[in-house]
Image (cartoon, rainbow, N blue to C red):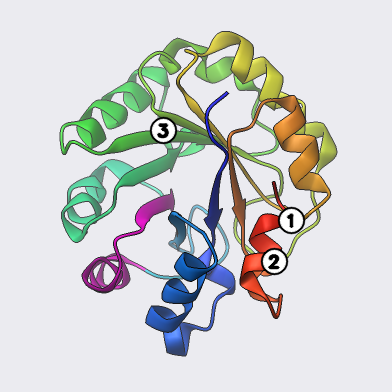
Amino acid sequence: MKELMISPSILSADFANLEKEVSAIKAAGAKWVHIDVMDGHFVPNITIGIPVVKSLRKVTDLVLDTHLMIDNPEKYIEPFAKAGSDILTFHFEACRDISHASDIISLIQSFNIKAGISIKPNTKPEVIFPILNQADLVLIMTVEPGFGGQEFMHDCAMKIPVIKENAPENIIIQVDGGINNLTSKICTSLGANSLVAGSYIFSHNDYKKAIQSLY
């Protein structure tokens, strides 16, 4: 299995000190940073956009793992890619159909960055089977996207082995939602190789200890 990649979500970080927070998670051992982009339409919350990605790119060499929880994702692929995202993940539910999703993956990859497809808790994993060979990453949501600090939905974790069984061996299977030192073990035992954790890491006094407890 691929090395487990922890992607701390800055949704739970101190926004007044983002550069400091990102430096702190890097010092604590993180190689990725998860950037939650919400538009107030696809999900009932508004967070950050292109300027924040651009600003972070200037101050860190961590992998910018950008999660687009937005409608019409194809309109924003180029600006987010040019702002410095290393991975762009969009939602299948924001697409008209599987062909539309396939086109967005191709568009993302045309900027020489990784393309991820995400599914919400009520979406069956089978719907994205036709594009698993094309995607670099699959993000399984174990909470309803839109807010941090929600409780882990155990039934959603059962999508992990389904994806693993039907995807190429080198695909990144990422899980986001309610990840802590206990739920992380459930996800990795089922085959996940990347975990997004926000409130669990950033509410901890010791980021390094928090990150290490996820392995």
Residue 21 position within the rendered picture, expressed as x and y whole percent measured from the top left: 48, 78
User: Could you tell me if the residues under marks 3 and 1 are in contact, i.e. CB atoms within 8 Å?
Assistant: no
Of circles 3 and 1, the one toward us is 1
Towards the viewer: 210 or 130? 210
In the figure, residue 23 lies in which quadrant? bottom left
Inspect the image, locate mark 2, and give the three-letter code of the amino acid beneath it: Lys
Residue 68 position within the rendered picture, expressed as x and y whole percent measured from the top left: 41, 51
What residue is at 71 percent from the left and 43 percent from the top? Answer: 142
Image side of residue 179 versus residue 83, left or right = right
Of circles 2 and 3, the one toward us is 2
Structural distance between the alpha carbons of marks 3 and 1: 36 Å
Asked whether residue 70 appears in the rendered view, the answer is: no
Inspect the image, locate mark 3, and give the three-letter code of the amino acid beneath it: Cys
User: Could you tell me if the residues under marks 2 and 3 are in contact, i.e. CB atoms within 8 Å?
Assistant: no
- Relative height, residue 17 to residue 49 (above, below): below
Image side of residue 125 versus residue 149, left or right = left
Towards the viewer: 190 or 78? 190
Structural distance between the alpha carbons of marks 2 and 3: 39 Å
User: Could you tell me if the residues under marks 2 and 1 are in contact, i.e. CB atoms within 8 Å?
Assistant: yes
- Residue beneath label 2, please? 209
What residue is at 15 percent from the left and 54 percent from the top? Answer: 82
Q: Which residues are magenta?
A: 49-68
Local secondary structure at mark 1: loop
Say the numbered circle drawn on residue 213: 1
In the figure, residue 103 lies in which quadrant? top left
- Residue beneath label 3, please? 95
- Relative height, residue 65 to residue 98 (above, below): below
What residue is at 79 percent from the left and 54 percent from the top? Answer: 181
Label 2 packing within 10 angstroms: few (<14), some (14-19), many (20+): few
